[in-house]
Image (tube, rainbow, N blue to C red):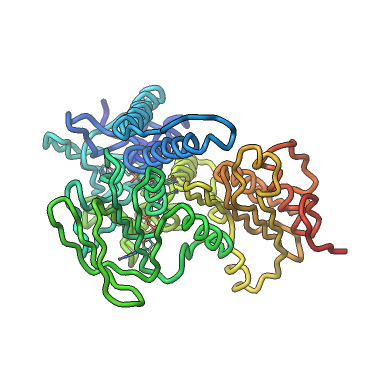
Amino acid sequence: MSDKFDVIVIGAGPGGYVAAIRAAQLGLKTACVEKWVDDKGAPVLGGTCLNVGCIPSKALLESTHQFHKTQHADVHGIQTGDVTMDVKKMVARKDKIVGNLTGGITGLFKANGVTLLQGMGKLLANKQVQVTAADGTVSVYAAENVILASGSVPVEIPPAPLTEGLILDNAGALNIDETPKRLGVIGAGVIGLEMGSVWARLGTEVTVLEAMDEFLAMADADVAKEAAKIFKKQKLDIKLGARCTGTEINGKEITLKYTDAEGAKELVVDKLIVAVGRRPQTQGLLSDDSGVKLDERGFIFVDGQCRTEAPGVYAIGDSVRGPMLAHKASEEGIMVADIIAGHHAQMNYDVIPSIIYTHPELAWVGKTEKELKAEGVAIKVGKFPFAASGRAMAADDTDGFVKMIADEATDRILGVHMVGGIASELIAQAAIAMEFGSTAEDLQLTVFAHPTVSEAVHEAALAVDGHAIHMANRKKR
Ligand code: FAD
Ligand code: NAD
């Protein structure tokens, strides 16, 4: 094997492995370096997303949602008797799904001719990449182009140091194998709400401490308000303005100390998940003379097309600016591989959907009403509740709404925000519409099949002009 590649990708998460496959598909001689190994020393591909992120969390969310639905099947006339959950089996199912997907990447690398280099990758000067394998062997490879896709790691906080089996980060949280009686979560962000939901559905008393006074500040205010109401009904006890000041472990219990507007408080839990955000993973990645610079927050500095300061070196995914989302990482990987292959490519950062996979799901794309108002954009808003959807009623899944925001002058859709049972699927319709520059009228004139939950998107578009059919809304002439 020659030691020179057209492209070397460092990191095999959804950013890196997708970039490597695309580059190889485009005829570039490509290698992907991954440091993660399992307990047998075999390479682990798929990064955070497949191993300890998106996929395992969704497997647990789906299992516990099915459990909850079965418990409430009586609404359909289905008599089930006592419903119980075998948590170990649920976790084993999750592990099997993870194994299938990560193993699948090995197959995809082989099928596409991507060379896997196991080891810790370090970018040296002049696009040389040093790889230190798990057994200590050091090799150096040259590349025409390098793509850094080293991802992110959880932020740790001094008052709650990770403690095996008790104080957990996202990886530990996904391996809890019996239902805790009491669970504490620090951070009411995406992980906190998703993992809190998993255990609340199984009967755990879940308390979530959130430092900010505002709940889900990144979401549209209507979504955050509706979600707060629903989570309260689901017995997720979310305490706002609550800062953890310390933890004390007594045997199998954790005493969580925190302060809120009322002063100092304590809470005793059996497990504590710390989910206060993630930070870019760049330790040991760059030699001093690599030419790559970090920004003031430690992210790899890149331009709008993911070029670093070093010519021929790109960076993508969680280790660069922008939302820490798998699909954002993958699309950046595709854009960069295309650019390297000489194609024109540009990613649309204005249309990246965000989803929180609770039930109902929270999903949005584009700008919030608050952001648009702050920018002084004149807007019109249409909102349609799932409670008025026949299909949602048939599914006994009527919580939430679709909210569409369009430009008052041009009618162009600027943001779509949803709370709903299958909002994660519906939001793709909004993303496609926005990517094509659709107006609300374009969706108004589109025929949606009946009866479908998607009709709520149609009705929200109609409501933008006060023309929704299945609810009373203002008339506009
Ligand atoms: P990563 O997935 O972090 O992969 C980076 C890879 O690079 C890792 O395998 C790492 O071992 C390797 N690496 C790092 N440094 C080196 C080095 N020097 N040499 C060799 N290898 C190296 N996003 C969504 O879009 N949807 C979701 O539902 C979702 N759920 C999530 C749930 C949880 C619990 C968590 C924690 C995250 C979730 N995310 C989700 C976020 C998503 O996982 C990340 O945005 C995504 O994994 C980022 O991809 P990446 O390729 O940039 O980095
Ligand atoms: P997050 O940024 O979503 O939420 C962290 C929350 O913790 C914030 O609300 C923050 O105000 C709060 N916080 C910070 N410090 C605190 C403290 N000391 N005490 C109490 N609260 C504190 O981060 P996360 O939930 O850890 O998730 C990390 C990243 O992973 C996110 O950026 C997200 O993009 C990604 N992720 C995505 C999905 C998804 O797409 N469905 C799921 C999970 C994770």
Residue 425 as seen in the image, left or right of residue 280: right
Rendered position, 104 above or below 445? above
**Residue closest to the eye, 404 or 48:** 404
Rendered position, 245 above or below 469? below
**Residue closest to the eye, 462 or 8:** 462
- Number of callouts: 0
- Give the residue displayed 29% in from the left and 32% down from the top: 88
Residue 118 as seen in the image, left or right of residue 52: left
Quarter of the picture containing the N terminus is top left
Spot occupied by residue 270 in the image (x, y as percentages of width and height): 23, 51
Residue 173 as seen in the image, left or right of residue 68: left
- Give the residue displayed 70% in from the left and 70% down from the top: 378
- Give the residue displayed 81% in from the left and 55% down from the top: 467
Give the residue at the far right of this rendering: 477
**Residue closest to the eye, 437 or 58:** 58
**Residue closest to the eye, 387 or 186:** 387
- For the question of whether residue 312 can be seen, the reply is no
Please tell me in which quadrant of the rendered image residue 239 appears.
Answer: bottom left
Spot occupied by residue 137 in the image (x, y as percentages of width and height): 13, 35
Spot occupied by residue 209 in the image (x, y as percentages of width and height): 34, 63
Please tell me in which quadrant of the rendered image residue 147 appears.
Answer: top left
- For the question of whether residue 173 can be seen, the reply is yes
Spot occupied by residue 21 in the image (x, y as percentages of width and height): 42, 32
